[in-house]
Amino acid sequence: MNLKDCYNFEDFRKLAKKKLPSPIFHYIDGGSDDESTLRRNTDSFNDCDLVPNVLASVGKPDLSTTLFGKKIDMPIFLSPAAMQRLYHPDGDRASARAAEKFNTFYSMSSMGNNTIEEVSNISGGPKLFQLYVHKDRSISDDLIDRSRRSGFDAMCLTVDTLVAGNREKDHRT
């Protein structure tokens, strides 16, 4: 199986499981504790029916929207993910370029493998910076200043990650 054979989410999962080392696959595929939240989220998406609006013109659909004052081509953006070089050699740079190509937001994790400045220089597309608040306030202040100076359009604050999640699947693999 390769990328051209992927037609749905499960195909991408199978390909990732085949290509990535087991600990890396389980890091991006798993959740914390017994993964009950992951299952509930997956079930919610599976329960959602996309019902077409029949007998309506779909000649030129427009999915664009405005977010943080930036017009983007679709109401989807790349969420922040730490340590992207684990699963792609270009890490955050590759994700930022992909988001720019499709004119949507790239969200950089403060736990990224590339620097804020590298990502800013690679992509002229819309970007948001995700901040974990550090105990040492000067680290947080520095990240905020650097993202601002580098032209990031917005910032999101993650407040629920005081400690790393207990990833039971990681203990079993």
Image: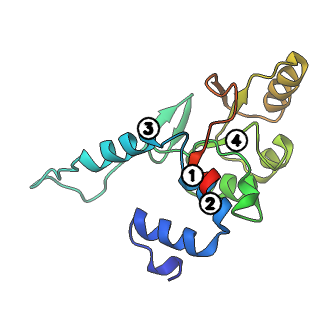
Mark whose residue sits in front, 3 or 4:
3
C-alpha distance separating marks 3 and 4? 23 Å
Disc 4/disc 1 C-alpha distance (Å): 26 Å
Q: Pointer 2: residues within 10 angstroms few (<14), some, or many (20+)?
A: few
Number of the front mark, 4 or 1: 1
Instruction: Find the distance from the CA under tag 3 to the CA under tag 2.
Output: 20 Å
Q: Which residue is mark 1?
A: 169
Label whose residue precedes the other's in the sequence (4 or 1): 4
Tag 3 secondary structure:
helix
Instruction: Mark 4: give few (<14), some (14-19) or many (20+) Cα within 10 Å.
Output: many
Spot occupied by residue 146 in the image (x, y as percentages of width and height): 85, 30
Extreme residue toward the bottom, this view: 1
- Considering only vertical position in the picture, is 106 above or below 16? above
User: Sequence order check: which comes first, mark 4 or mark 2?
Assistant: 4
Q: Would you say the residues marked 4 and 2 are in contact, meaning their CB atoms lie under 8 Å apart?
A: no
Q: Is residue 42 left or right of residue 120?
A: left
Q: Which amino acid, by three-letter code, is at mark 2?
A: Thr
Residue 31: % across, % down: 54, 45
Q: Which residue is mark 3?
A: 37
Could you say whether the residue bearing mark 1 is in a helix, strand or loop? helix
- Type of the residue with mark 4: Met
Q: Quadrant of the C terminus?
A: bottom right
Q: Which mark is residue 173?
A: 2
Q: Secondary structure at mark 4?
A: strand
Toward the left, the furthest residue is 55
Q: CA distance from mark 4 to mark 2?
A: 28 Å
State how far apart marks 1 and 3 are (Cα). Answer: 14 Å
Residue 7 in the image, given as x and y percentages of width and height: 39, 72
Along the polypeptide, which appears first: circle 3 or circle 4?
3
Please state if 102 lies on the left or on the right of 75 as rendered.
right
Please give the label number shown on residue 52: none
Please name the amino acid that badge 3 sits on.
Thr
